[in-house]
């Protein structure tokens, strides 16, 4: 990593950017196309104060020089890093305003957080990270949620972590989170944070499934029966008007009044859930988010065609309203992740 002054190597010379007037180390980063390579004059004292990792690197340079001192001719080569992000890090650590042309979207903020974590200087960047996270567009894709989680965790931004993880639990599908391990940045997300998020998503889905089951129990508890209107032929299952005397298709004169019973209501409830793509809940919960589940529950009432003598007080309608209330409560009760305390 330590090299002789080499910013003019390979036929390409990047201009030295003096970040500190009394800088005593040249840092070179040659990664990507030569026109993106950069060279900075930095202060080993400043970098050593904010970063134990840089302190260790500079101690190694002193030993290499055999002089007990680091001179401006000393050169540190960090060619494995992104020149743009490393420049941003050095600018902030030398109390300079970061370049305005760097768009700090969630991916960039997460990439910089990984770099800061590598060089043990996340705490020095924390004020800037709060500013960047506060001004970045809200996450929309699963990856953007992951970048926001990663950055807020590494920068220890507790409030942002709690907020964005609660949104992630509500808006992400379990299957999309599972793909994070293939992402070159998200593989740095600590396993404990990942497990905590997945556990919260699974717990929320379990509660939604319980809400659906609770309403089945609710229907079983109401034994009242009501007239539905119409007469039914028990041979062919056809429904006829109340005035009908015979099912002409079967020549059956034993027609019975249709009745809204607990069993009938449970059947209608399950049909309505299926029409809203909510059945069976165990399969649905694997392929949709909490908010998608809640939106489908919201559509159940409009799909009900049930009309009986109880009118609006039919337990079927009351049960669907109860389901909406319970699901809204479940959504509102979702809590985000907590720093260093995944549970
Ligand atoms: Zn019939
Ligand atoms: Zn009814």
Image (cartoon, rainbow, N blue to C red):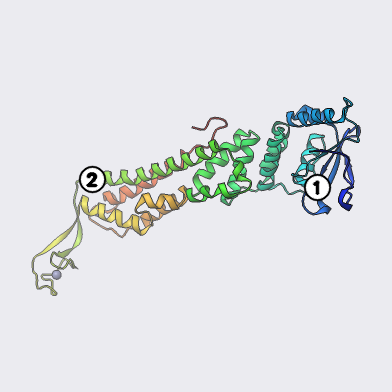
Q: Is residue 134 visible?
A: no
The circle on residue 30 is 1
Name the quadrant containing residue 73. top right
Residue toward you, 25 or 331: 25
Above or below, comparing residue 37 to residue 251 in the picture: above
Residue at mark 2: 220
Q: In the rendering, at what x and y percent does residue 150 appear?
A: 61, 40
- Disc 1 or disc 2, which is closer to the eye? 1
Ligand 1 sits in which quadrant?
bottom left
Judge: label 1 CB < 8 Å from ligand 2: no
Above or below, comparing residue 29 to residue 22 in the picture: below
Q: In the rendering, at what x and y percent does residue 78 appear?
A: 78, 41
Left or right for 121, reference 13: left
Q: Residue at x 79, y 54 (%)?
A: 33
Name the quadrant containing residue 109. top right
Q: Is residue 11 visible?
A: yes
* Mark nearer the N terminus (1 vs 2): 1
Q: Secondary structure at mark 2?
A: helix
Q: Callout 2 environment at 10 Å: few (<14), some (14 to 19), or many (20+)? A: some
Q: Secondary structure at mark 1?
A: loop
Residue toward you, 46 or 128: 46
Q: CA distance from mark 1 to mark 2?
A: 71 Å
């Amino acid at each position: 990593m330590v090299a002789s002054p080499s910013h003019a190597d390979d036929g390409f010379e990047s201009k030295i950017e003096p970040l500190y007037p009394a800088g005593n180390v040249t840092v070179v980063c040659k990664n990507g196309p030569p026109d993106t390579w950069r060279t900075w004059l930095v202060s080993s004292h400043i970098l050593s104060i904010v970063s134990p990792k840089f302190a260790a690197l500079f101690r190694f340079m002193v030993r290499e020089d055999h002089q007990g001192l680091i001179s401006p001719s000393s050169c540190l080569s960090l060619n494995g890093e992104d020149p743009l992000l490393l420049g941003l890090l050095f600018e902030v650590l030398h109390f300079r305003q970061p370049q305005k042309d760097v768009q700090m979207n969630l991916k960039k903020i997460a990439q910089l957080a990984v770099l800061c974590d590598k060089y043990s200087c996340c705490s020095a960047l924390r004020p800037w990270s709060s500013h960047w996270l506060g001004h970045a567009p809200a996450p929309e894709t699963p990856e953007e949620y992951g970048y926001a989680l990663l950055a807020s965790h590494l920068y220890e931004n507790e409030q942002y972590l709690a907020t964005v993880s609660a949104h992630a639990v509500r808006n992400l599908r379990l299957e999309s989170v599972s793909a994070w391990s293939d992402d070159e940045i998200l593989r740095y997300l600590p396993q404990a944070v990942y497990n905590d998020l997945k556990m919260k998503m699974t717990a929320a889905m379990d509660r939604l499934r319980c809400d659906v089951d609770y309403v089945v129990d609710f229907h079983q508890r109401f034994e009242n029966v009501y007239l539905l209107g119409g007469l039914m032929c028990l041979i062919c299952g056809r429904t006829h008007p109340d005035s009908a005397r015979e099912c002409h298709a079967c020549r059956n004169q034993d027609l019975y009044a249709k009745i809204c019973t607990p069993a009938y209501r449970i059947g209608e409830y399950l049909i309505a859930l299926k029409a809203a793509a909510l059945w069976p809940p165990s399969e649905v919960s694997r392929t949709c988010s909490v908010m998608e589940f809640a939106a489908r529950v919201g559509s159940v009432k409009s799909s009900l065609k049930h009309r009986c003598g109880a009118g609006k007080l039919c337990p079927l309608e009351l049960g669907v309203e109860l389901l909406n209330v319970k699901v809204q409560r479940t959504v509102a009760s979702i809590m985000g992740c907590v720093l260093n305390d995944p549970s």
